[in-house]
Image: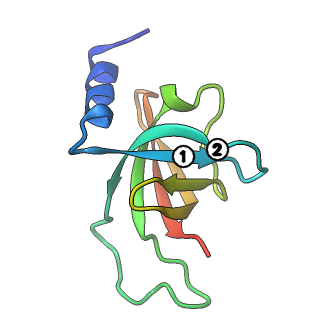
Amino acid sequence: MSTAFDAALASLHADPNMGTDAEWRAAAGGAWRPLRVLLSAPADAVAGLGGPGGRAVALEATLRVADLVPDAPRRGDLLRRLSPPETWKIEDVEPDPLGLSWRVSLARSA
């Protein structure tokens, strides 16, 4: 069922100034799945925390539920931006209250 909120979210993801082409793959493996994501830097990022022994969130991304049905992102999955190419590991997943998207925290992948 499409709602005004779902249509607005789809429009934001499709906008070339907001959304970016990416791919998602489950930690268990399998094929990369194409999707559009909204990337943002967390407001509470602490510079220099990315060294050994610490985990720093590099970015956050909003993924549409409709792009991954029947799957859902989980900690350890990979998200890869296509241009410029960069791969991150999903550290945390938070669903939105309407069930239309997930907000995922991303750490740089080795």
Q: Position of residue 60 (x, y in %)?
A: 40, 58
Q: Is residue 8 above or below residue 107?
A: above
Q: Is residue 59 above or below residue 52?
A: above
Q: Quadrant of residue 70?
A: top right
Residue occupying the point 64% across, 49% down: 74
Which residue occupies the foreground of this view, 94 or 31? Answer: 31
Left or right: 98 as drawn, with respect to 72: left
Residue, disc 1: 23
Mark 1 secondary-structure assignment: strand
Which amino acid is tagged 2?
Trp
Q: Is residue 97 above or below residue 1?
A: below
Left or right: 38 as drawn, with respect to 109: left
Q: Position of residue 47 (x, y in %)?
A: 35, 86
Q: Which mark is residue 32?
A: 2
Answer yes or no: do the residues labelled 1 and 2 have beta carbons within 8 Å?
A: yes
Count neighbours of disc 2 (C-alpha within 10 A) and say few if under 14, some if 14 to 19, many if 20 or more: some
Quarter of the image for the C terminus: give it: bottom right
Quarter of the image for the N terminus: give it: top left
Residue occupying the point 29% across, 22% down: 5
Which residue occupies the foreground of this view, 49 or 97? Answer: 49
